[in-house]
Image (cartoon, helix red, strand yellow):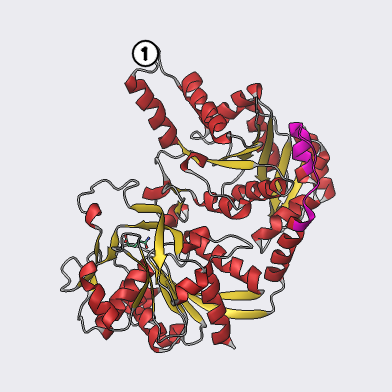
Amino acid sequence: MHKPKFVVVTGGVLSGLGKGLFIASLGKILKMRGYNVIPIKIDPYMNVDAGTMNPMEHGEVFVLNDGSEVDMDLGTYERFLDVNLTTKSNITTGKIYKKVIEKERKGEYLGKTVQLIPHLTAELKSWYREVAGDADIVLIEIGGTVGDIENQIFLESVRELSLEEDVFFIHSTLVPVIKVVGEQKTKPTQQSVRMLREIGIFPDMIYCRSEKPLLDNIKKKISRFCGVPEDYIISGPDVSNIYDIPLLLEDQGVGEKVLRGLGLEERKIIDDELSKWKKFVNNIDNPKRTVKIAITGKYTYLHDSYVSILEALRHCSGELSCKIDLKWIETTDIESGRIDVKEALGDVDGIIVPGGFGSRGTEGKIECIRYARENNIPFLGLCFGFQLAVIEHARNLCGLKDANSTEINPNTPHPVIDILPEQKKIKDKGATMRLGAHEAILKDGTIVRKLYGKDVVSERHRHRYEVNPDYIKILEKNGLIFSGVSPSGRLMEFLERPDHKFFVATQAHPEFTSRPLKPNPLFLGFVKACLIQGQ
Ligand code: GLN
């Protein structure tokens, strides 16, 4: 019988140290050895999924092909591992409790007192095994830090799992340097490992995040106090390019060590895959050219809210060996007149208007789109950015004064963007948008058709509004081309302007499908146009 092996990564000291990046990178070097790996992220919050959370607080809501709204770490996993995951790879407290409570109501535990231990832990263990499928290795990341009340039951579930299966435990910590002392301090690591051992988990490896590489005497000290061999204390210094991390782990033999710990064959990395990855990393680290791209949005101070867009751009950097200088535009400043649109965009080679909800900053975004159109500056509109491009066109080229989306102004005289009919009766907010992968048919002879190189494409969605079918004729008559539509022909999915260098937008979120070595075609086309613009 197929028996998958498990790697569990726990966190200590602080959250937000990049456990997700570590796991994704570890998965990458295992995959480069021909192992079939699958990740699971555990988020110990009560929300059933990330869809109802504020991106300012929790980072971007990532969307999978199957339509689930998940933690942004799933995006990291998909990008590094080049796989399409399902909702099963993200467990939350809300999701697992819901499952157990539903079973209880059906009578599946009839006569029993249903308890966290053993019932919830049993449910978790069977979830881990089910996700495993035919994978060789399951990588489980437990969100939060050891000592948190909310992740205790998940830690208990993996402790139980280790009694039944081969589990390799990695604890990820922080080794800070106090500036005046200038010394790498090990105490927080010692204490978090002690807490982990108290609950019955003994780490096999410790991954130490620090500003600079870990010094040898510090490794020795951590090894001595934490009971982990010195060569299993792994250094995780700060990097400017996250795609360097698999190479850093490879240099420290992490792949072989984990395989040895799991009793799996220590295969050599596939040379061709490694050299392609190194070239991609090198292109980003040593760029030949630079482009300046503006991104508009209201969470401009929290880049985690836009991580997939930033990564999609980085994939283009790796393909084209160009540095992308970002300029964040807070569009409320344009609206209020504090900054002039020309001052904001006069020095950029391209403009991205990303997704968004609500009315704040939208007039400023529409101004930016007008500026891009009138000055022939490459423009990429994503979801809300697509809808706002339609509004700009309607107002300024179709004579539809005060045209708007009913999301922004329910009383607009020209609702060129309106709620999807099937959304009208929906009251609940959780997982009710038009979500996940949907196909679009691309029109012959358009830019979008050329970029994708095929007639039918699938991209992921997350929206409630659409181009109002009543206005399509007038919008098209005045120079807008809807270059991609849903298979039924009703939903407008892509638009472009034939009279412009590069003016493309989509109702979808193409940033979710961009991968290192396989940048999304729309982003690649856009950055190429920006490079020409910058010459
Ligand atoms: N608010 C818009 C809608 O719901 C756009 C959503 C988005 O940009 N993800 O349709």
Residue 252 among those drawn in magenta: no
In the depicted structure, whether residue 301 falls above or below residue 15? below
One can see residue 127 in this view: yes
Q: Would residue 152 be found to the left or right of residue 500 on screen?
A: right
Q: Is residue 134 left or right of residue 502?
A: right
Classify the position of the C terminus by image quarter.
Answer: bottom right
Residue tagged 1: 110
Query: Residue, x 44% and y 53% (percent of image)?
Result: 61
Q: Residue furthest top?
A: 111
Which residue shows up at 77% across the image and 51% down it? 270
Residue 405 x %, y %: 25, 68
Question: Residue at image x 65%, y 49%?
Answer: 22
Q: Quadrant of the N terminus?
A: top right
The reply to whether residue 174 is visible in this rendering is no
Image mark count:
1
- Give whichever of 61, 240 is nearer the camera: 61
Q: Relative to residue 4, is residue 524 depicted above or below?
A: below
Q: Is residue 260 magenta?
A: yes
Q: Position of residue 186 (x, y in %)?
A: 73, 44
> Where's residue 228, x and y in %?
77, 35
Looking at the image, residue 152 sits to the left or right of residue 267; the answer is: left
* Residue density around tag 1, few if under 14, some if 14–19, many if 20 or more, within 10 Å: few
Task: Magenta stretch: give its range.
Answer: 256-272
| Three-letter amino acid code at the position of disc 1 | Leu
Query: Which quadrant of the structure image shows residue 30?
Result: top right
Q: Give percent across and percent down for residue 40.
A: 55, 40
Mark 1 falls on what kind of element?
Answer: loop
Judged left or right of residue 30, residue 441 is left
